[in-house]
Amino acid sequence: MPRDPKTPFPFHSVSNGEWCPPPPSKLQRAAEKLYVEESAKRAKRLGLTRREFMKTAAGTATAFLVLNRIHGLSAHASEAVLPVTAEQCDDPEAAGELFASKPFVMDVQLHHVDTETFPADFWGFLRFYHPDDASGLSNAEKAELLSQANFVKEVFVESETAVGVLSGVPNGTPMPVATMKQTRDLVNQMAGSERALSQAMIEPNHSNPAAPTALSTMEHQVVENGAAAIKCYTGSYDWYLDDEAIAYPMYQEAQRLGLDVINVHKGFPGQVSQAEEAYVTTRDLEKATRDWPQLKFVVYHSGYFPTGSAQGDGIAGFLADIESMGPRPNLYAEIGSTFANSIFQPEQAAHLLGQLTKALGSWRILWGTDSVWWGSPQWQINVLKALQIPESMQEAYGYPPLSERDKARILGRNAARLYGIDIEAKRCAIDADALTALRQREGPNPSHRSYGPASPEQYAKLVAHDARVAEFKA
């Protein structure tokens, strides 16, 4: 097995396989180097190995210190994005104060690989582990890191995630519809309580009407598989949410089957489809949300476009569309991968949440992490617990402050409301279940690995493998 990663979370972009990440910048590499130096000093003073120190709250606090220092940001009081003190970096007990809150966490975007349908030789073309870990893995070890077993460990044992939603992917590659149900049932059986839900993956104009993700399968996915929401990709087979001939029959069928949550991938063009980027913009939301007020439309990734894409940068297009369409109480933003990719530039993370809360309110932002591609979601949870929007940014951009109540909404209360979950009843069941007992008995032991491609070179290998992907899709 490879040596342990150098940092408790990536200091640079990691892709979920749907877009090409830029190479780590000189500043990001400098941040990693500084983190190694700072953590080594503190670990020595505490009589710990660097790996042991990384696992402590002080290890994460030190990462905050490094990000603040590298970017010239304040670390204290009202002007900090990631407030942290020297004592918190030196003392794990003091650092625990940063992450002491215990919100209900519901993650609505989770994935893993079906390593039986898509075995080790299928995934052997890409390194799914921390990109600075150069000692290498065998194909079988790579597959295991993406497997159902490691998914359960990273999400439900190594993080505070209370409830997770298995999220669909186009054509069921690399997690078929049947596998979502199987993993959901396994998690709930292991726990002895309902910790996982699954989606119905629907491609309303699939070229093969008998395919497992075709519109004709929705009843089976809902009635037999117990899917709790729809997931769709407008960039797969090239269609729009406001197409009355393609999308509207899907909404009608969802309503007939008692579903009112429509999750749609927007932004992050690339590996999902060879379609033009226009299909994954949010321009089709205005009419769809107006015509179907009884449905809740959840925009996955908040419509994020990476820097340099034809449609612009970040979530600017989504924000412009929100403004132009006026009040839409049935429109929600999900932040999987978008939030994670903003964290290594803390001001971007503050801008992201400031923009979304200003445009939609904190009650219409859903927590998603795109794990297992990012490894355990706990580091993302910890960042949101600590993050704040500085007063100067509030004044300059009109952002509301990010209160503990706002964070609790984003981390889980909003999703629980959409999926009809009684949080207090769920907490009682989870507190007494077997996965919670395992987490308490063994204590968190995060791998600190991320599994998605982290450079253009790694992503190019993924894209070059499209012919093999197409074979599995057929």
Image: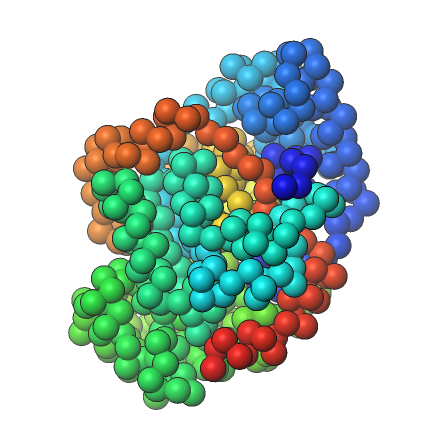
Name the residue: 22% across, 51% down: 420
Location of the N terminus (image quadrant)? top right
Determine if residue 142 is in view.
Answer: yes
- On the image, the x and y values in percent for residue 387 come to 53, 34
Which residue is more in the foreground, 391 or 409?
A: 409
Looking at the image, which residue is at 37% across and 56% down?
166
434 on left or right of 56: left
Height in image: 437 above or below 27?
A: above
| Residue 430 percent location from the top left of the image | 26, 35
Residue at (69, 17) in percent of width and height? 42
Residue 455: quarter of image:
bottom right
Give the quarter of the image for residue 140.
Answer: bottom right
Q: Is residue 447 left or right of residue 461?
A: left
Task: Look at the picture and state if 393 lies above or below 307.
Answer: above
Outermost right residue: 26
> Which residue appears at 74% of the width and 36% of the height?
31
The residue lying toward the viewer, choosing from 296 and 463, is 463
Horizontal and vertical percent position of residue 459:
67, 63
Regarding residue 324, the answer to whether it shows in the image is no
